[in-house]
Image (tube, rainbow, N blue to C red):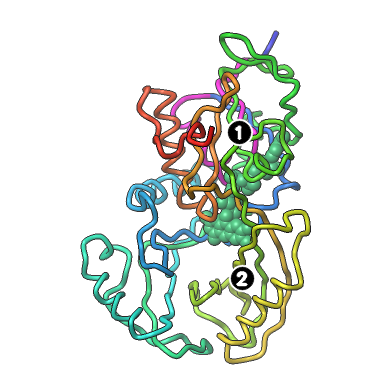
Amino acid sequence: MKKHVDYIIVGGGISGCVLSYTLMKYGASVVVFDLPKNNKCSTVAAGLWNPVVLKRMKKVWKADDMMDELHTVYPDMERWTASQFFDPIAIRRVFHNAGEQNTWMELCDSPAFSSYLEDSISPLPEGVVGEFESGQMKGTGRLNVLGFMEAVHAALRKEESFREERFDWNAVVRDSEGVDYQDLRAHAIISCQGAQMALGETDVLQQGFAPVKGEVIRVKLDAPLEKECIHQKHFMLSEGNNEVTVGATYAWDGFGDGPTQEKKNELEEHVSKVWNGSTRTLDHKSGIRPATKDRRPMVGPHTLAHTWIFGGMGSRAVLMAPYLAKVLVEHFMYGTDLLAECLPSRFS
Ligand SMILES: Cc1cc2nc3c(=O)[nH]c(=O)nc-3n(C[C@H](O)[C@H](O)[C@H](O)COP(=O)(O)OP(=O)(O)OC[C@H]3O[C@@H](n4cnc5c(N)ncnc54)[C@H](O)[C@@H]3O)c2cc1C
């Protein structure tokens, strides 16, 4: 006798965790398959959420909807898991020239930006070096991604909904009503496999992904930094205990190489320019972002029957996943429209 479950979810990174919670909130049952030790992306993420692309001072696509959903979902997930991982903190933009400072002052009064930008310019915190002053953001923060995933996996385990094993797509049997896999009978399977959908590490490949490698370093400073994230060319995120995470870099190759000396040098050079004191690198990590060719996420049906994709969130999974999960789950539950710009079929 098969165990009936509504959805099998493959992948327990940020996407899989948020989606499984959302499905359960709407009354569906799930079983999540994940290989947490293989997860090179969500475990590396700094976990920041920010509705504004600071380099261009443009709002992220659907930023307002995403911010609303994020501020509901993660606190709800904290209650569900009885854990803490949602940490609102300011992101400080250090201006590179007077023009950037003027743009900030113009935008902070506009209705589109006033809820995200403080309407004053402030001096740099002690120890931080820069030619110009800075502006602080509102509503931003960081998800402690490792703590978040650990808490969600534990909560799923309690409900016998988490299996720490490789999902073998070749062993799926499909019929007109759904799928059979091992002891499970499910309505559908949802792939939340991140960049692995593009790197040939899964049997369900999807066109349109354009993975981007990123690296971060953890650095010990010689003095404390306020609890905030400082954004110049790279970000410097205060982790307490005089430690900061500095990143991230971008590369479009070398996916199998792991952390590189070249990017470590780039980040260390950055720290030496922006911090007025001595520093020591403690750790260095890399991951591969599940970005797409048109920078829109990937949410919708795969060409295989009863198979769906939820991912492609590039460097913004923390911000995007709660809103996109709601869109997908409400489509399943109520037949509401999916987002045309996110359909995987746009690349076929
Ligand atoms: C250096 C760096 C810094 C970043 N900083 C941020 C940030 O500050 N804020 C932010 O929002 N984003 C950030 N990102 C991006 C963020 O990490 C990604 O958007 C996010 O991790 C993607 O999550 P995911 O769940 O879609 O994929 P993944 O995290 O890759 O998860 C996929 C999971 O699927 C599992 N899996 C795959 N195949 C199988 C299988 N066959 N069976 C079982 N399990 C399987 C994998 O083991 C993995 O656990 C950063 C990325 C990098 C590299």
Farthest front residue in view: 348
Q: Residue at position x 71%, y 26% from top?
A: 169
Do residues under tags 2 and 1 come within 8 Å of each other at their CB atoms? no
Q: Position of residue 129 (x, y in %)?
A: 51, 89
Q: Which of pointers 2 and 1 indicates the residue nearer the eye?
A: 1
C-alpha span from label 2 to label 1: 30 Å
Classify 10 Å Cα crowding around label 1: few (below 14), some (14-19), many (20 and above).
many
Label disc, if present, on residue 191 of the rendered structure: 1
Query: Left or right: 221 with respect to 131?
Result: right
Q: What's the magenta region?
A: 3-28
Q: Earlier in the sequence, mark 2 or mark 1?
A: 1
Do we see residue 85 in this rendering? no
Q: Residue at x 57, y 24 (%)?
A: 303
Residue 176, can we see it? yes
Task: Assign the N terminus to one quadrant of the image.
Answer: top right
Q: Residue 234: x, y in percent?
A: 55, 73
Which class describes the residues within 10 Å of circle 2: few (<14), some (14-19), or many (20+)? many
Question: For residue 249, which quarter of the picture?
Answer: bottom right
Residue 18 included in the magenta stretch of the image: yes
Q: Is residue 147 above or below residue 262?
A: above
Q: Which residue is mark 2?
A: 245
Which is nearer the eye, 208 or 55?
208
In the rendered structure, find residue 38 and report the number of the disc placed on it.
none
Amino acid at pointer 1 = Ser
Residue at 65 percent of width and 42 percent of height? 198
